[in-house]
Amino acid sequence: MEKRLKRVLIIILVICVMCIIREKVGIGIISVNEQMYTSNIYGYGARDEIITEIQDKLKRWGYYKGSVDGTYGYNTMEAMKRFQKKYGLKADGVANGKTLEKMGIYERRGEKKAIKEEKEEMLLAKLIEKESKNEPYVGQVAIGAVIVNRVKSSIFPNTVREVILEEGEELKIEKVSEEALKAAEDAIRGIDPSNGATYYWRIKEKGAEEREITANIGRYKFGN
């Protein structure tokens, strides 16, 4: 009887120890995940190289008017809120993982997403240069986004080159501006000021009358 009781007690003790170990391991895993996640969060008062990139993009897109100094101040936070609100993100002014991904900023995690190879990006930059050279930066990104949206759509060709050729565009452009290259990169990374458009028209151009307009930027209308 005593031996049986001892065995039962030992089994109970082993089970209790295993539960404790399991609980501690679980807590440890949660802590590691939280640390990995929060390492990509930037808020008021933060200083980092990546904040310079955040400010630069917000400024080019018209959300931020302050200096690009790498310090996450009040103006940066308010600009971030406007950006987040525009794209349906939680508008708390904090640059978290989802917000950074939407901005096309992956360097912190060692990631750099691109839907096409470098040649495709250059083709897109040439199209942007041709179509929207004197447009505001956000308009240039929107032009690029329309092409990217077509590539993603099942009713258009599957590459930037094929989409451009389908439209009969001739891209005999030798020099592409740095701004057009950045706009192409941002469009490929998923920034979409056109709000999902697959077409664009100049303001006075016919063809948009019966279309759903998703954005008006500079001299262009965007829609589907």
Image (cartoon, rainbow, N blue to C red):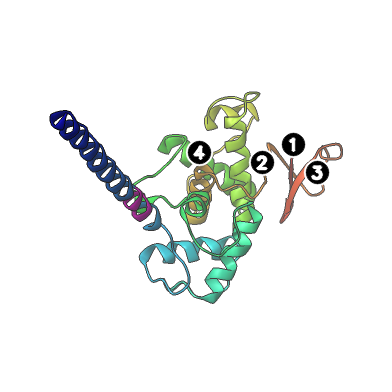
Q: Quadrant of the C terminus?
A: top right
Bin the neighbour count of mark 4 within 10 Å (Cα to Cα): few under 14, some 14-19, many 20 and up: some
Give the amino acid at mark 1: Asn
Of the two numbered discs 1 and 4 in the rendering, the one whose residue sits closer to the viewer = 1
In this rendering, the label closer to the viewer, 2 or 3: 2
> Looking at the picture, does residue 117 appear above or below residue 77?
above
| Amino acid carrying mark 2 in the image | Gly
Question: Magenta residues, as a range?
Answer: 30-35
Residue 183 position, x and y percent, is 53, 51
Q: Which class describes the residues within 10 Å of circle 3: few (<14), some (14-19), or many (20+)? A: few
Whole-percent x and y of residue 117?
42, 35
- Dot 2 surroundings within 10 Å: few (below 14), some, or many (20 or more)? some
Q: Name which quarter of the figure residue 25 lies in.
A: top left
Q: Which residue is mark 1?
A: 224
Residue of label 3: 205
The residue most toward the right is: 209
Q: Which tag, 2 or 3, sits closer to the chain's start?
A: 2
Residue 223 vertical position relative to residue 93 in the rendered view, above or below: above
Q: Amino acid at mark 4?
A: Leu
Nearer-N-terminus badge (4/3): 4
- Residue ID for mark 4: 123
Lower sequence index among marks 4 and 2? 4
Q: Which residue is mark 2?
A: 196
Specify whether 99 is left or right of 2: right
Pointers 2 and 1 in contact (CB under 8 A)? yes
Lower position in the chain sequence, tag 1 or tag 4: 4
